[in-house]
Image (tube, coloured by chain):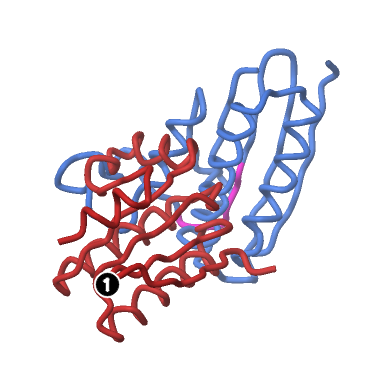
Chain colours: A blue, B red
């Protein structure tokens, strides 16, 4: 397998979620990932781009969401960058805690962590947050 | 094509919603919310969601299921789920919601469970 990188820049509207997912599906296939990996990546990219559009960029269409897919021997890496003010991932409550079970939101990051092997967020010096997710092949 | 198609049918006093598509942020979640609201306005409080045709649900869709469950319960009704696909079952297991919802594989059994 050769190393490959694809970059997308999407506007901050909800249709960007489906666009990113379609690109991810295509990318995952080219990287030779199996069905289970493809399902996990699909969930993670949808949740990540939804968070970037809705929570970070607050659907402000002057702001963009950049998605980078990289594939190398043994792993896929996806980065989703927003132009929001950032957040502390440690402050997000556990949605499986009995006290939170019936909440109608707050499961996106939990699902990303569940379906990807390695997940980290970092604030960029120029502003905005990047989510980096890795999945072993 | 709509993201989520919902067909309604009546089985005794239970309203069955046959759902086909995806329950995701935007159109799919809104379609489910609207359908449940309309049924409650019509006094139809025993609702069975047939999810056999739903291959995907995101966190927004899961939230909408929880919201529907809570809204219907508060109104004195009952929401039950029928025929989860394996992926939906996995997602509800991971989020620990499988124990919250009343889930059936067999429609006759689901219908008989309503009080």
The quadrant the C terminus of chain A occupies is: top right
**Nearest to the observer: residue A12 or residue A100:** A100
Q: Position of residue B104 (x, y in %)?
A: 33, 45
Whether residue A91 is visible: no
Residue at (56, 32) in percent of width and height: A133
Residue at (46, 65) in percent of width and height: B29
Q: In which quarter of the view is residue A113 placed?
A: top left
Q: Position of residue B115 (x, y in %)?
A: 14, 61
Label 1 marks a residue whose chain is: B
Q: Position of residue A78 (x, y in %)?
A: 64, 35
A83 falls in the magenta region: yes
Q: Is residue B88 above or below residue B49?
A: above
**Main SS of residues in magenta:** loop
For this orientation, the residue located farthest to the bottom is: B42
For this orientation, the residue located farthest to the right is: A2
Give the extent of the magenta segment. A80-85
The quadrant the N terminus of chain A occupies is: top right
Q: Is residue B53 above or below residue B95?
A: below
Q: Position of residue B78 (x, y in %)?
A: 21, 63
A66 displayed left or right of B97: right
**Nearest to the observer: residue B32 or residue A43:** B32
Whether residue B72 is visible: yes
Q: Which residue is mark 1?
A: B13
A27 displayed left or right of B52: right
**Nearest to the observer: residue A123 or residue B93:** B93
B21 falls in the magenta region: no
Residue at (66, 19) in percent of width and height: A75
Q: In which quarter of the view is residue B84 placed?
A: top left
User: Which class describes the residues within 10 Å of circle 1: few (<14), some (14-19), or many (20+)?
Assistant: few
A63 displayed left or right of A30: left
Q: Is residue A136 above or below residue B78?
A: above
Residue at (16, 42) in percent of width and height: A98
């Amino acid at each position: 397998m050769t190393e490959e990188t694809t970059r997308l820049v999407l506007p901050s509207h909800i249709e960007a979620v489906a666009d990113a997912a379609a690109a991810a599906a295509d990318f995952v296939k080219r990287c030779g990932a199996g069905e289970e990996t493809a399902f996990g990546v699909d969930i993670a990219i949808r949740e990540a781009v939804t968070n970037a559009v809705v929570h970070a960029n607050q659907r402000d269409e002057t702001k963009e969401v950049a998605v980078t897919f990289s594939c190398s021997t043994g792993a896929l890496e996806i980065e989703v960058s927003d132009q929001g003010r950032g957040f502390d991932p440690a402050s997000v409550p556990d949605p499986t805690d009995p006290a939170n079970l019936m909440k109608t939101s707050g499961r996106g990051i939990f699902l990303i962590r569940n379906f990807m092997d390695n997940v980290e967020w970092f604030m960029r010096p120029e502003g905005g947050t990047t989510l980096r997710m890795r999945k072993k092949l | 094509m709509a993201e989520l198609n919902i067909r309604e049918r009546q089985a005794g006093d239970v309203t069955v919603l046959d759902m086909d598509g995806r329950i995701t942020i935007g159109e799919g979640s809104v379609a489910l919310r609207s359908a449940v609201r309309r049924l409650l306005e019509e006094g139809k409080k025993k609702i069975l969601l047939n999810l056999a045709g739903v291959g995907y649900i995101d966190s927004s869709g899961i939230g909408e299921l929880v919201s529907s469950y809570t809204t219907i319960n508060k109104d004195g009704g009952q929401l039950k789920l029928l025929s989860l696909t394996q992926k939906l079952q996995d997602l509800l297991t991971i989020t620990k919601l499988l124990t919250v919802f009343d889930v059936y594989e067999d429609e006759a059994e689901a219908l008989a469970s309503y009080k």
